[in-house]
Image: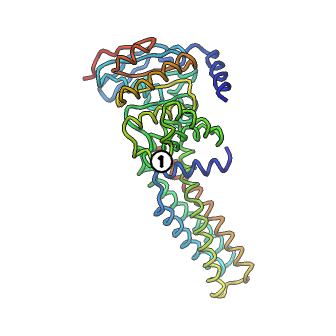
C-alpha cells in the first residue's frame, strides 16, 4: 500500500516540474493591496519557508495555494491544474487528493474523536474502510498520538490538537503540504517530532512543503526561504 | 463508494454539523402529520384529487426539508469552512444531511400513512384495503422524493449564496 503511494507520487513528479505556479497574481481586500503581480514557481519536492512580519499576508498566500481564497487577478496552477478557475466542488475534491493543510487556527471538529477527525479527509477522497483504518493508525503512530485515538478532540491540549491537525493533513499522503506557523503552539519535544517528520517526508517522499513561520528551526530546515518585507498598512 | 461508506460518512458529518435529535424529531413529526392527513384524504377522493394531494405532499415536505437543510448549513458556517478546507464538497455535505435525516423522514411518513390509511377506512374510504395500501405507498414515495429534493435544494441554496 505504502509502496503504491510512492509509485503514484513518482509518477506525478515525472509529469511536470512544478507543484505550484503563480502567474501575475495580485490580491487585495477592498482598497488594501496585499500582493501585486507575483510571479514564481515552486519545484516539486521543494521545502519553502515563507517568513515576514505579522499581518504581511503570509496566510493569505497559503490560503490562495489551497484555493481557500481567490486572487484578485492572475492564475495559480497547482499540480498542473488551474485552481483559480475551479468551482467550489471541484476544488473540494482536488484538495482531498492533493493538499494537506495545517492552518494556524485549529479547524478540528471538537465533537468528534481524534480518529474520526483524522479519518474525515479519507471519506472525502473516497478511500475504502480497511485502507482508512490502516492509514489512520499509521499516521497517528507517526505523530505519536495513537494512544489518544478515541479521545474527543475538545479534551486535548493545544499541542495535542496541533499534532492531530498534522496527522489529518498527512493521512491521505498528499503531494503538497501547506503549514501555517506549525510549531507555534508546540512544546520543544512535539516541535522536534514535527520537524523530523517534515524533514523525512520532504527527503524520502519528495513531498512539496510550503510553510509560513517565525521559527528559526523551520527556516533552517527549508531549502529556500521567501521573505515578505512589507507589513500591510 | 459503497452505501455503507456513505452512511458512515453521513453520520460522521452529521455529528460534525450538529444535526441533533431535535432535528430528527422535527423531520419525523412533520412527515407523519402530512402523511396521515394525505393518506386519509386520498381514500376519500377521486383520481384528480389524489394527484392534487400527492402534489401538495411533495411541495410542502420539500419546502420543509429544504428549510431544515438550509438551517443546518447556516448554523454550521465555520464547521463547513473547516470541512471544505480538508476536501468536503457541497455534494458530500448535502449527502450527510440527507443520510442522517432520511430514516426519520421515511419512518415518520410510514407511521403517518398507516394512521391515515386506518382513518380513511373508518371514514368510509372507497376501494377498501387495496386502495388504502396503494395510498400508503404513494404517500411514502412522494414524501421520500420531497425529502431528497428539499435537502439538496437547501444545500444548493446555501452554497450559491
Q: Residue furthest left?
A: A233
Identify the residue shown where x is 39% and y is 22%. Answer: A212
Specify the quadrant that holds the N terminus of chain B: top right
Residue B97 percent across, percent down from the top left: 53, 53
Residue that appears at 54% across and 67% down: B28
Q: Secondary structure at mark 1?
A: loop
Q: Nearer the viewer, residue B77 or A26?
A: B77
Image height check: is A49 above or below B161? Answer: above
Residue B101 visible? The answer is yes
Above or below A119: residue B71 = below
- Residue B122 locus on image (x, y percent): 64, 87
- Quadrant for the C terminus of chain B in the image: top left
Q: Is residue B89 left or right of residue A111?
A: right
Note whether residue A182 is visible.
no
Above or below, B152 against A97 in this view is below
Expressed as whole percent of the image width and height from the top left, the position of residue A135 reads 59, 35
Kindly indicate the quadrant of the structure image that contains residue B151. Answer: bottom right
Q: Which residue is pictured at 36% across the width and 20% down the height?
A: A35
**Residue at the spot x=58%, y=68% of the render?**
B57
Q: Quadrant of residue B127?
A: bottom right
Q: Which residue is mark 1?
A: A112
Colour setting? rainbow
In the rendering, at what x and y percent does residue B36 appear?
58, 76
Residue B122, above or below A36? below
Q: Quadrant of residue A79?
A: top right
The residue marked by circle 1 belongs to what chain? A
Amino acid at each position: 500500500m505504502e509502496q503504491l503511494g510512492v509509485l503514484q507520487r513518482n509518477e506525478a513528479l515525472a509529469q511536470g516540474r512544478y507543484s505550484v505556479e503563480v502567474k501575475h497574481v495580485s490580491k487585495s481586500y477592498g482598497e488594501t493591496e496585499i500582493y501585486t503581480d507575483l510571479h514564481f514557481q515552486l519545484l516539486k519536492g521543494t521545502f519553502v519557508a515563507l517568513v515576514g512580519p505579522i499581518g504581511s499576508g503570509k496566510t493569505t498566500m497559503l490560503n490562495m495555494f489551497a484555493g481557500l481564497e481567490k486572487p484578485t487577478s492572475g492564475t495559480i496552477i497547482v499540480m498542473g491544474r488551474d485552481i483559480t478557475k475551479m468551482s467550489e466542488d471541484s476544488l473540494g475534491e482536488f484538495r482531498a487528493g492533493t493538499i494537506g493543510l495545517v492552518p494556524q487556527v485549529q479547524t478540528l471538529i471538537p465533537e468528534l474523536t481524534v480518529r474520526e477527525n483524522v479519518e474525515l479527509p479519507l471519506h472525502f477522497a473516497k478511500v475504502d474502510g480497511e485502507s482508512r483504518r490502516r492509514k489512520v493508525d499509521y499516521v497517528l503512530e507517526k505523530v505519536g498520538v495513537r494512544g489518544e485515538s478515541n479521545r474527543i478532540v475538545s479534551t486535548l491540549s493545544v499541542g495535542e490538537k496541533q499534532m492531530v491537525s498534522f496527522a489529518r493533513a498527512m493521512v491521505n499522503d498528499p503531494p503538497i503540504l501547506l503549514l501555517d506557523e506549525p510549531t507555534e503552539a508546540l512544546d520543544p519535544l512535539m516541535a522536534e517530532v514535527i520537524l523530523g517528520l517534515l524533514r523525512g517526508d520532504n527527503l524520502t517522499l519528495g513531498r512539496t512543503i510550503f510553510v509560513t513561520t517565525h521559527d528559526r528551526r523551520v527556516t533552517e530546515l527549508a531549502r529556500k526561504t521567501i521573505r515578505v518585507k512589507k507589513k500591510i498598512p | 463508494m459503497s452505501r455503507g461508506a456513505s452512511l458512515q460518512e453521513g453520520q460522521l458529518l452529521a455529528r460534525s454539523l450538529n444535526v441533533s435529535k431535535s432535528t430528527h424529531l422535527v423531520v419525523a413529526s412533520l412527515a407523519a402529520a402530512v402523511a396521515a392527513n394525505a393518506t386519509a384524504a386520498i381514500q376519500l377522493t377521486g383520481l384528480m384529487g389524489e394527484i392534487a394531494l400527492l402534489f401538495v405532499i411533495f411541495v410542502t415536505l420539500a419546502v420543509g426539508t429544504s428549510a431544515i437543510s438550509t438551517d443546518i448549513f447556516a448554523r454550521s458556517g465555520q464547521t463547513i469552512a473547516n470541512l471544505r478546507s480538508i476536501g468536503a464538497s457541497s455534494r458530500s455535505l448535502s449527502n450527510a444531511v440527507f443520510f442522517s435525516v432520511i430514516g426519520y423522514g421515511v419512518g415518520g411518513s410510514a407511521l403517518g400513512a398507516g394512521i391515515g390509511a386506518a382513518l380513511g377506512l373508518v371514514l368510509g374510504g372507497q376501494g377498501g384495503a387495496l386502495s388504502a395500501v396503494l395510498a400508503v405507498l404513494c404517500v411514502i414515495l412522494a414524501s421520500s422524493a420531497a425529502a431528497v429534493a428539499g435537502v439538496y435544494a437547501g444545500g444548493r441554496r446555501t452554497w450559491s449564496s
